[in-house]
Amino acid sequence: MSGRLGLALSGLCALLAGCETPAAEPGRFLLDRGHESLEAGDPERALFYTESALQQDPFEPAPEEIALHTDVLRRLSRRDEADAFAEFAARYAAGEATDTADTVPSRNDCKKIARKRAKSTRLVREYGDLPVRHQFEIGVLAASYEIDADGRPIHLRVIRARHPASAWLIIASIAELEVWKSRLATASEPFPIPHCAYWDEAIPKKIFIPPRMMR
């Protein structure tokens, strides 16, 4: 009797295991919430979820994560940022070595540009915050860009980042930079004015999550 009961229980366990619901893919919940927020007309909230999804498994971003993040940026009319992110993500997906010191412009070139700005007109007052949603490996960040006559950063290109999640951090930060408005009119160089950011330490002091995203 006990033997038959054991066999019956074993068969039941096997049956239950076979009907077990597959585990959700990492980041699937975040992607679903991103899609839902976008469809509900809330692209700002969708952006929070796509940032979170990218940072959850940064070295192996799913194509859907890249596509949704880019789509969200375009819905927000942040086309320059969308183009810069998509361009970097394509290079990363193609296997390009994106985290290398051999960049164009180089670290020394960026230093020369910074010295030139200091001697002429230093326009950048401060960069925007890094939208970090999880603890993850950020690494060195570098990007080239230009500032136009209205003080807007344009022609942004990430020249060094460990993965798309890191690349997005410097894109977002530069896009939100503030300039000295009083210095635009007295700039000694023709617009747009070349700039370069090369950050060896880009880890923020804390993770910032907007209160409305906690709901």
Image (cartoon, rainbow, N blue to C red):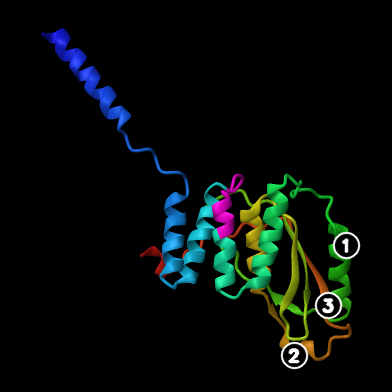
Q: Which residue is mark 2?
A: 182
Q: Quadrant of residue 130?
A: bottom right
What mark, if any, has residue 34 been given in the picture? none
Please give left or right for residue 55 compared with residue 187 in the image. Answer: left
For mark 3, does the 10 Å Cα neighbourhood hold few (<14), some (14 to 19), or many (20 or more) residues?
some
Q: Amino acid at mark 2?
A: Ser
The reply to whether discs 1 and 2 touch (Cβ–Cβ < 8 Å) is no
Which tag is nearer the camera, tag 3 or tag 2?
3
Q: Residue at x 38, y 38 (%)?
A: 22
> Which portion, as a residue range, is magenta?
58-67
| Residue 99 sits above or below residue 3 on the image | below
Q: Which residue is mark 3?
A: 193
Q: Secondary structure at mark 3?
A: strand
As drawn, the residue found furthest toward the left would be 1
Please give left or right for residue 105 compared with residue 61 in the image. Answer: right
Quarter occupied by the N terminus = top left
Whole-percent x, y for residue 81 in the image: 66, 68
Q: Which residue is mark 1?
A: 109
Q: Residue at x 71, y 80 (%)?
A: 152
Indicate whether residue 84 is drawn in magenta.
Answer: no
Counting residues from the start of the chain, the first of labels 3 and 2 encountered is 2
Q: Secondary structure at mark 2?
A: helix
Q: Amino acid at mark 1?
A: Asp
